[in-house]
Image (cartoon, helix red, strand yellow):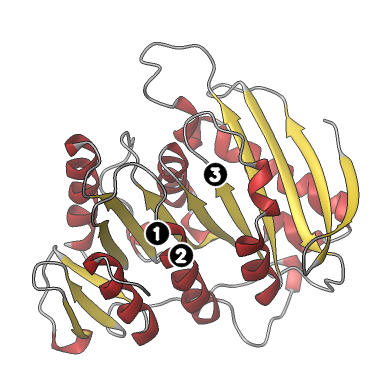
Amino acid sequence: MFCLVIIIPTLTIRAAILDDSIPSGKNFDKAAFRLWYPDQSKTIKGVIVLVPGSNGNGRGLVSELFWQELAAKHSFALLGCYFTDRPHEDLEVEAYANVKEGSGQALLTVLTEFAKKAGFPELADAPLVLWGHSAGGEFNYEFVNWKPERVIAFVVNKGGFYFTALGSKQARNVPGIIFTGEKDLQSRRDILKGIFSINRRVGALWTFAEEPGAGHEIGQTQKLAGIFFNEVIPLRIPKAIDLKDNSIMLQSLTGNSGYSGNCKDLSYKDISNEQKDPSISWLPTLKFAEAWLSFIKGSPF
């Protein structure tokens, strides 16, 4: 494995960057990563993992000020990912998204390597926030079903192929957003709505959000996801952290608090008044509920 250490000033945040990679494995050819963290950090409480679309190089995403400010606010690091497939049948299906076959372990292994090189042992077991677009969202969904105990929150964003339908109860208790685009392929929209509905029916703490007028692009989904992460991270990371064994015990959430969002009548209300309905979204806070409603209406937020 190769590692490069750079200390750079960004627009507002002085930071350290590490590059590393993992040898090709069973379900991936390339697995290369870039870690970003504020160089004044005393403790890293978690990692925001950024996974782009099909076979894309997401290492440069750690340079985006949007993600840097979110990470710095919560004393998190950023991890930009670059996965590519090995040659295989059905190349439209990204095999590396099936994380239990090796690509998920590659991510965990590189975090252990970064922990040694950066001098932050807590990185090896740090809880993760998962952002991804298209195949990156597929990767996120499969990761939360593979290692739900490691995930604070996740985003599934307009992807098309998934290996898991009904998640475990532990996976369903990880807060997440499932995005679709109104003008995206109907197959993607149907698949994602189905995944949301089957899991929401049994209480998944998930939000469904279709972006009006949007196709397969990122659009405004990153902005809404940022608000979601900002709201959920404090709910899951204890205020008083005891880094025993360099790990953080995440706080559990339940579907008995927060708000319910109705895409059909474009409304939200206190969730205590809501009956079980697989079309109703779980919204963790009032601030997020307001942003979600503006998003699905196509209004500024």
Mark 3 neighbour density, 10 Å: few (under 14) some (14–19) many (20 or more): many
Residue located beneath label 3 in the image: 51
Please say whether residue 251 is visible from this viewpoint: no
Do the residues under discs 2 and 1 have CB atoms within 8 angstroms? yes
Cα gap from disc 1 to disc 3, whole angstroms: 17 Å
Coordinates of residue 12 in the picture (x, y in percent) = 77, 69
Figure check: 117 above or below 235: above
Q: Secondary structure at mark 3?
A: strand
Figure check: 9 above or below 2: below
Cα gap from disc 2 to disc 3, whole angstroms: 16 Å
Q: Secondary structure at mark 1?
A: loop
Residue at 11% over, 68% down:
277
Residue located beneath label 1 in the image: 220
Image quadrant containing the C terminus: bottom left
Residue located beneath label 2 in the image: 223
Q: Secondary structure at mark 2?
A: helix
Kind of residue at badge 3 = Val
Mark 1 neighbour density, 10 Å: few (under 14) some (14–19) many (20 or more): some
Residue at 82% over, 30% down:
1
Circle nearer the N terminus (1, 3): 3
Res 42 → quadrant: bottom right
Please say whether residue 214 is visible from this viewpoint: yes
Do the residues under discs 2 and 3 have CB atoms within 8 angstroms? no
Kind of residue at badge 2 = Lys
Kind of residue at badge 1 = Gln
Answer left or right for 53 relative to 188: right
